Amino acid sequence: MNIILLLPKKILMLLIKSYQKFISPFLGSNCRFNPTCSSYAINAIELHGSVKGSWLTLKRIIKCHPLHSGGEDPVPGNPINLKDEK
């Protein structure tokens, strides 16, 4: 695949993994969802690409507030989730 098409995905993944490694440990485990928002972002971007994956991640982060109960919220279309639904 063309490197230009992969570059946004690689940059986003680097940013998210840097957050997980350097920032998240200091914030503690505060995510009300499973998987965590950063893990969700990685899965969404890997599965759907940088544009749709970022959109799904943004929608997920908007739901992450004290008035939302949280819980299980897997990435749509993830083959692992589809296997569990059968």
Image (spheres, rainbow, N blue to C red):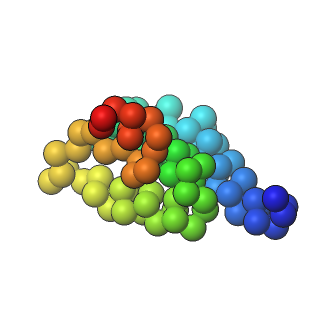
Q: Quadrant of the N terminus?
A: bottom right
Residue occupying the point 39% across, 34% down:
83
For residue 44, side relative to residue 62 (left or right): right
Q: Nearer the viewer, residue 24 or 55?
A: 55
Image quadrant assignment for residue 31: top left
Q: Nearer the viewer, residue 16 or 51?
A: 51
Please tell me whether residue 28 is drawn above or below residue 57 in the rendered image.
above
User: From this viewpoint, is residue 30 visible?
Assistant: no
Q: Nearer the viewer, residue 77 or 33?
A: 77
For residue 52, side relative to residue 5 (left or right): left
Residue occupying the point 44% across, 57% down:
57
Q: Nearer the viewer, residue 38 or 5?
A: 5
Which residue appears farthest toward the right when viewing the image?
Answer: 3
Image quadrant assignment for residue 40: top left
Residue occupying the point 76% across, 59% down:
6
Image x and y of residue 58, in percent = 42, 63
